[in-house]
Amino acid sequence: MKSRWKLACLVFFGMTTHLFAQEKATKPKPEDTEAWKPVPPVVQPGPYKETPAPEGAIILFDGKNLDEWINTRDGKPAEWIVKDGVLVVNKKTGNIETKRKFKDYQLHLEFMFPDNSEFKGQSRSNSGLFLASTGGGDAGYELQILDSYQNETYVNGMAASIYKQAIPLANPSRKPGEWQTYDITWTAPRFKSDGSLESPATVTVLYNGVLVQDRFILKGETAFIGQPKYKPYDTAGIKLQSHGDASKPMSFKNIWIKETK
Ligand code: MG
């Protein structure tokens, strides 16, 4: 009897260990969805020029206050820092997003990185613009913001990538200390009443005036691990990422949006 017990225990533990080992081998990892080529060509952009908001645009940040923004984590007034007419990321208080919710739009955003050359890859001035914030934390569709000036990383995670979905067509990154621009056209996904996808989201992005995403059709919400998936929503805020890297915080200015639907 005793030895039969022992045998049963041995078989049980043997099977469990085997299952754990199997799970470890097949468990998806962040690296599985990194693409390292093709490396987009480096393109020298034209000189920086501020693009003032056109008639009918909603000013999301004009250098004065954060009235249009809330903390993602608790919905309270956004706690990033407004200083000398620019918005500086506050790493301690997490992501911020707009109070207003949007569907389809054109958006303009300007940003500048400090010199963080002691950091490499994804740790050098990482932020992000979530084209639709569909939940807390990093939920949504991320257009990557990263210092990609002479900074190697996986190409579907560099500046102007749709994070882990779309490699930019070019790398027109300016040096840290110089202002840079994104001009985005976003068409939100549409869902049927049963929650299934009716039409996917598409995005076009100009980075420093250079076309880097051309009507890209998204595969779903950004996933750090695993494959992107769609989750139904109607309208959503625009979110800026406070990334957990140790580099000095970056700045934003002149953010405006013009709804197209
Ligand atoms: Mg990011």
Image (cartoon, rainbow, N blue to C red):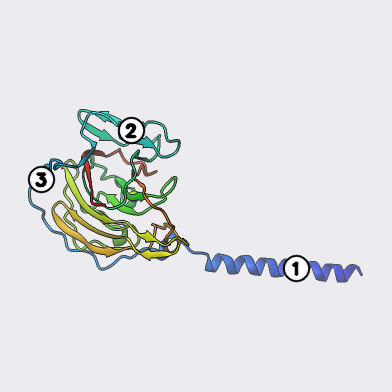
Q: Earlier in the sequence, mark 1 or mark 2?
A: 1
Horizontally, residue 57 falls left or right of residue 46, namely right
Residue assigned mark 1: 12
Q: Name the quadrant of the N terminus.
A: bottom right
The image shows residue 74, relative to residue 189, as above or below, that is above
Residue reaching furthest to the front: 193
Between circles 1 and 3, the one closer to the viewer is 3
Q: Which of marks 1 and 3 is nearer the N terminus?
A: 1
Q: Does the residue labelled 3 lie within 8 Å of ligand 1?
A: no
Foreground residue among 126 and 136: 136
Residue 78 locus on image (x, y percent): 36, 33
Residue assigned mark 3: 48
Answer whether residue 117 is visible to the viewer in this image. Answer: yes
Foreground residue among 193 and 219: 193
Residue 218 locus on image (x, y percent): 33, 63
Point 40% across, 34% down: residue:
92
Residue 213 locus on image (x, y percent): 22, 61
Dot 1 crowding, Cα within 10 Å, few <14, some 14–19, many 20+: few
Does the residue at mark 2 contact the one at mark 3 (Cβ under 8 Å)? Answer: no
Q: Tell me the kind of residue under disc 3.
A: Tyr
Which type of secondary structure does the marked residue at label 3 adopt?
A: loop
Q: Tell me the kind of residue under disc 1.
A: Phe
Residue assigned mark 2: 80
Answer whether residue 154 is visible to the viewer in this image. Answer: no
Point 18% across, 52% down: residue:
173
Which type of secondary structure does the marked residue at label 1 adopt?
A: helix
Horizontally, residue 204 falls left or right of residue 52, namely right
